[in-house]
Image: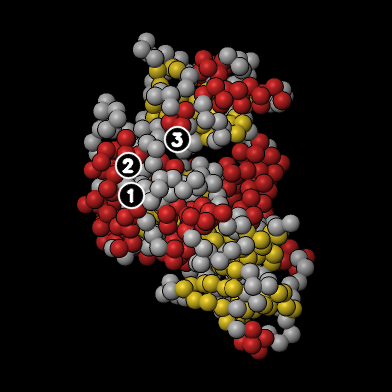
Amino acid sequence: MEKSMRLPLLIAAALALPAHADTIIDRANGYTLNAAGQLQRFTSLAFDDLGRIVAVGSEAQTAAALPKAEHIDVQGKTVLPGLIDAHGHVFELGEIASGVELYSPTSLNAAVKAVADFARTHPKKAWIVGFGWNQEIWKLGRFPTAAELDAVVNDRPVLLHRVDGHAIWVNTKALEMAGIDKSTRDPAGGKIERDASGKPTGVLVDAAMELVNRVVPLPTPAEARATLDVALAQLSKVGLTSVHDAGIKVVQDDIYRDYADHGKLTTRIYAMIGDTTADFDELSKDGPLKSYANDVYALAAVKLYSDGALGSRGAALLAPYTDMPSTKGLLFYPDAEMRAKMNKAMKAGYQVNIHAIGDAGNRQILDAYAALIPQHNNVGLRHRIEHAQVVALEDIPRFKQLGIIPSMQPTHATSDQNMAEQRVGHERIKGAYAWRSFLDQGSRIACGSDFPIESPNPFEGLHAAVTRQNNANVPPGGWYKNQAMTLTEAFRCFTLDAAYAAHQENVVGSLEPGKWADFIVVDRDIFKIVPEQLGKTTVLQTWMGGRRVYSRR
């Protein structure tokens, strides 16, 4: 569809949608934040027929503001601003429902059995695709192999994504279809795992994944829309009214705009263009899209990658891995090439958000920002480092000095606690998952989950941020608890500061007059329960723009 035709279509679609009445939420146990990030209480919330908040406060105040409104009694339930995930992968979340689920298996044998069972019950699938394997949980001490998959599926290609999304495990059929053999060279920024003779063993890390990914058939338009439908339903169910989608292509932009045109986006999407290659050239022709369809969609950022992940030892470190001194991980690009990508995005006016896990990856990007931001005089674009996971202690202050937002995922710390210190050692771990260090220097952290690598449930993120424990409340007392957030800080990271990281703090992120009525009703008062219960919070209702998009049965 031509972009010039979208505005008339949007107007027609809006006229076709049912009108909302002025509405008041009564008897709420309400919490929100003011512009300074301080916690505020309320018992009533009023919003108009367009879905914008008119008044927040007592029932007398809201009734005076909208005397003819419809009233909804929430019977003392807790009402919160809609939560925001500052880093997720929406279509990938939906794809998991149609593939092999490998997050649950706790052994290699169990994972292989799951693949076998899926292949048997899906005989017409041309590719067996799965998500979530983690050799660290299996206590293998090595990566799995193609031979182990060949034993159960050898007639069709199998492609299984590691839990961190930075490695794939494939069978021999997939290697053959991709033309990968002993003579295939490792691509820049990637690694093909090999045996002693140099033969590929079936695991490809980071850039090497593309060797297989490029021969996988693209989903049909119908499949892509079905995937998005599944993802949106999951996001509303866990109380996410806004998500920053970390890396999209032209086809996904088309679908998002179409859904926005027809009132089908039940979660606001702040999207990042994946890389500065052909998709960027197409999508950036008219410059950043800061707001579309009443702030339902935006495309104003670019997502780049500096390095890989810690679990697959692809994260770039300044010194060798403690548990594998033969490697320091991988920078995806030399400094000059990375800066050229960043410069291209900045020249076009885009916020630049860069994945950096290791201390070398973070330093490469901080050095690049230090050179490019003054050149473009664009600190106001609020550039970000996604993950900022292992940072040299002397580099942490540079985030504040350069105006860089650390976009971090609390559940990464509690998921990685089983291997992170093994990877980087006792000294480097002091700058890892260092939320307190960032907050104390005045940095605003934008919190997310990196779903589907982690659960999209933001209450699990709040739990991890406050307790430094996983869902089973392990370890006792918390893992490096000195880096924990207070609950108010964590709440702000998943609301107002996540909105700030998308230039949207004036329209979402808190419940204040003039902002959109994005809010949730939950089953417990998160500010009065013990922190260990935060992750068990259940969403009862989700509202986006004054429209109820989810109700728990």
Residue 157 placement: quadrant: top right
The residue wearing badge 3 is 166
Distance CA(mark 3)–CA(mark 2): 13 Å
Residue hosting label 1: 480
How packed mark 2 is, by other alpha carbons closer than 10 Å (few <14, some 14-19, many 20 or more), is many
Percent across and percent down for residue 434 are 33, 52
Q: Pick whichever, 481 or 295, lies toward us.
A: 481
Q: Residue furthest left?
A: 394
| Residue 372 at least partly seen | no
Residue nearest the observer in this picture, 4 or 215: 215
Q: Nearer the viewer, mark 1 or mark 2?
A: 1
The CA distance from mark 1 to mark 2 is 18 Å
Name above or below for residue 34 compared with residue 530: below
Q: Amino acid at mark 3?
A: His
Residue for point 66% across, 24% down: 117
The percent coordinates of residue 190 (x first, y second) are 39, 29
